[in-house]
Image (tube, rainbow, N blue to C red):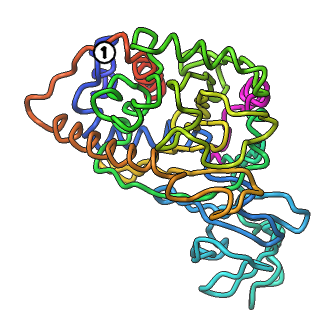
Amino acid sequence: MNSISKLIEEHKHNWSLQQAFYKDKNIYALEIERIYMNSWLFIGHESSIPNVGDYFLYDLLDESVILIRDKNSDIKAYMNVCRHRGSRICLEPNGNIKRFTCPYHAWTYNLSGSLIAANSLNEDIDKSKLSLHPCHIEVIEGLIFINFSDNPRSMDNLKRDMTEAMQMFGFKDLKIASQKTYPIASNWKLAVENYNECYHCGPAHPEYSLSHSLKIQDEPGYDQAQLAMNNSLTECGLKEITVDADYMDQEEGQEQYGYQRYGLFEGYVTGSKDGKPIAPLLGDIKKFNPGASDFNLGPVCFLLAYSDHVVGYVFTPVSHEQCRCDVYWMVDKNAKEGLDYDLENLMWLWDVTTLADEKIIVNNQKGVNSKSYRPGPFTSKELSEKNFIDWYLKQIKD
């Protein structure tokens, strides 16, 4: 039995992980292979590249992907690697191009990824076999997902069960108002674990706790907030939808997903400092509903939808003890900054919350690094975190 298998066998169910899972470089390498190279990752919205030739790059560790709108107005994904000697092709993070030209030897590709020019290439070389390597891509209600695997998990069940909820909030008609990357000096799992539980929200996030009911049924005010939210769903143009599929409940070969809506406290209709609207209503929503919807879209990608804006979170590793959190703030595509919304007000809650979480997670990593660290028991308020840990161990098990 290898050391990783032994650690998995020794894991105590419903307890946190042993120290090695947060520090060992071999375990980290296995996680990248089994999880990040096999999971669907939310990386942006199609509104970011509206015109033919518009592109942006997405980087994860050694991988770089070009997302581009081709001549047929379809969004394609190509690995940012020249088929000649491997140079990066696109060096700028975004832009508009008529063709791809490698900066090293000027090999040139069209927007469909086909090699169209290679100076001095032998005539007997078949250029049609030297197209850019594609990357798997799905565009679901405007949201762009990529997958690095040669044989990715299916998104069919996710699309079947989540599309209606996405359409309620007009996901296809969103635009990214702002995006910010938060570096975190911790193992990526500590960041995902932190996001998956709200046990810490009361003591750690006073701004969030003032307006949100913490998603925990026995917390004060939860039942009243849920009742007020549910009683106004129909008149607001929303439906009561629950997709209770949290990590361990997915079919084999299907990607992770889930959906739930929870109430905001009285006086709050969205995630703003004063509880008042901060942007135009989304989709077909008729009036503000005092609630927020959680979308789990893959194991490390999460969206939170209010009546007037959506906030997206993606957690990705940088090293075994470094990760990043990419946060996206999205509003209706027709909303104008300065007229329909104020960017500082839009970003306030989840910026201050993420900055607080960064400190919490870094302190968690420091404690885990101690020779005194031992796994501890989860509480009844950490169900999603427990499910994530169970799912995680299943992914890396031989």
Hey, which residue is sitting farthest left in the picture?
372
* Quadrant for the C terminus in the image: top left
Q: Residue at x 48, y 42 (%)?
A: 274
Viewer-closest of 111 and 210: 210
Image position of 134 (left or right of 218): right
Q: In the rendered structure, which amino acid carries the disc numbered 1?
A: Phe
Q: Which residue does the numbered mark 1 point to in the structure image? A: 378
> Is residue 166 toward the left or the right of residue 195 in the image?
right
Question: Measuring 72% from the left and 42% from the top, which residue is drawn there?
Answer: 281
Bin the neighbour count of mark 1 within 10 Å (Cα to Cα): few under 14, some 14-19, many 20 and up.
some
Tell me the quarter of the image containing the N terminus.
top left
Residue 391 in the image, given as x and y percentages of width and height: 47, 22
Taking 207 as reference, is 116 above or below it? Answer: below
Q: Which residues are magenta?
A: 146-165
Residue pushed farthest right?
72
Percent position of residue 208, x then y = 41, 35
In terms of image quadrants, where is residue 375? Answer: top left
Residue drawn 67% across and 50% down? 331
- Taking the view exactly as shown, the residue that stands out farthest to the bottom is 120
